[in-house]
Image (cartoon, rainbow, N blue to C red):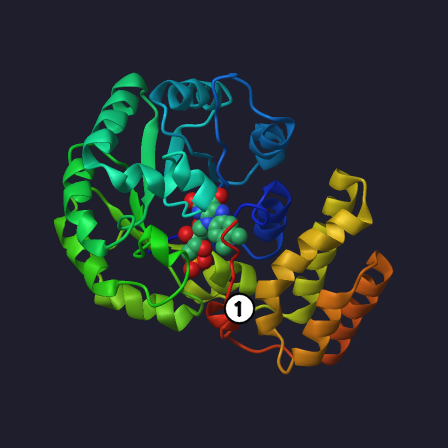
Amino acid sequence: MRCDYAPMEGITNYLCRNAHRRYFGGVDRYFMPFVSPCKDRVFTKRELRDIVPEHNEGVPVVPQLLTRVPEDFLWAAGELKAMGYREVNLNLGCPSGTVVAKGKGSGLLASAEELDRFLDAIFSGTDLTLSIKTRLGLRQEEEFGPLLEVYNRYPIACLTIHPRVQKDFYRGAVRMEAFRAALAMSRNPVCYNGDLVTAEECRTLEAAFPGLDGVMLGRGLVGDPALGRKLRGGEAADKETLRAFHDTLYAGYCEAFGSAHSAMSRMKEMWFYLMGLFADSGRQAKALRKADTPQKYERQVAEIFRDLPLRQDNPGLWRDVPGWPPEK
Ligand SMILES: Cc1cc2nc3c(=O)[nH]c(=O)nc-3n(C[C@H](O)[C@H](O)[C@H](O)COP(=O)(O)O)c2cc1C
C-alpha cells in the first residue's frame, strides 16, 4: 500500500524531507506544507525555499495550496507547473481558527455549493493532476454526505480523508465508521490519514479496508522516522542513524536560519514527537524542553542518545497531551 508523508507546517520542510529520505526512506511521496497564494501573485521567500526544485532533488514531493479563490489557486498551480510539478494538492482540512474564519482549509467545507463552484473552476482551469486532503466537515460528520457528492463529480487523483471534523482539531477518537461509509461511497481513490503511529496499526487498517489507495502518516512518522520502512518489512530505527538524521537536520537549520537558537526551537518541535521512541525519557524530555541555549540543547541531546534505550514502536504519547497541537 502506498505510504505518503503528511504535510506538517514548521516540521516537514525541505530540510526534513531530504534528511528523512536520505536516512530512512520507506515513503512514496512527501506532501509539502501548504502555500497560501494571494492576489499579489508572488510566493514569499520562505515558500520559495521550500518549493524550488533545487531543494527537492530526488525527493518525490507534492506541493499543497490553501486558498478559497480559484484565480489564486490557478495562478499558483501555473507557477508550480512551470517549475516541473505534475500534481498539486488542495488543503481542505486545516482546522486553524484564523484559516477557517477566512473560509479556507476546512472552512471551505461550510457550503457544498461553494465547494462545488470552487472545484469546477479549478478542475476546468488546469491540466495538472489535482488531489485533495479533507476533513469530514466543520461541526459534525453527517456533513460529509453532500460534500462527498461534490467530490464524486471531479476526477480527484486521490482524496485523502482525515476522519475528524474541524471542531475536533486533532483531538478525540477518529471517526472510523464515517470513514468506512466515505470509502464505500467515493468514486475517487481514497487515502486514510489520522493517528497511525505503529506498523501494526497501519497493517490492521489495511486489512480492515482493502479498498484503500494508501495511508498518509504525519505525527507517527515524525515520532518514528523508520515507520514507513518498517511497513515494508524494513529495519527499525537504530541510534546511530537517528543521531545522523538529527545532526544533519540541526546543521541544516543552523545554516538556513543563520542562528543556532532558532534551529534549536525547530528541533524541539520534532522532539515533541520523537521523544516517545526513547524509553523512560521523562526527565530528559523535561530538560530538553527547558534548554534555553544551543549549548544546553546539544548537551541534552547527547545525553539522550548516550543514556536512553530505544523502543521498538513509538507509543504516540502526544496523542493525549491536552492543548496540542496549539489551535493558533
Ligand atoms: C504541527 C502540524 C502542522 C500541520 N500542517 C499541515 C499542513 O501544512 N497541511 C495539511 O494539509 N495538514 C497539516 N497538518 C495536518 C497533518 O498533515 C495530518 O493531517 C494530521 O497531523 C493528522 O495525521 P497524523 O495523525 O498522522 O499526524 C498539520 C498538523 C500538525 C500537527
Give residue 200's quadrant in the image: bottom left
Give residue 295's quadrant in the image: bottom right
Q: Is residue 166 left or right of residue 327?
A: left
Q: Nearer the viewer, residue 221 or 93?
A: 93
Rendered location of residue 232, percent (x, y): 42, 62
Q: Residue furthest bottom?
A: 280
Is residue 86 something one can see in this rendering? Answer: yes
| Residue displayed at 38% across by 35% down | 104
Q: Considering only vertical position in the picture, is 327 above or below 207? A: above
Q: Residue furthest front?
A: 101
User: Element at badge 1?
Assistant: loop
Rendered location of residue 291, percent (x, y): 78, 64
Q: Assess mark 1: CB under 8 A from ligand 1? A: no
- Residue designated by label 1: 235
| Residue displayed at 40% across by 28% down | 86
Disc 1 marks a residue whose amino acid type is Glu
Is residue 245 something one can see in this rendering? Answer: no
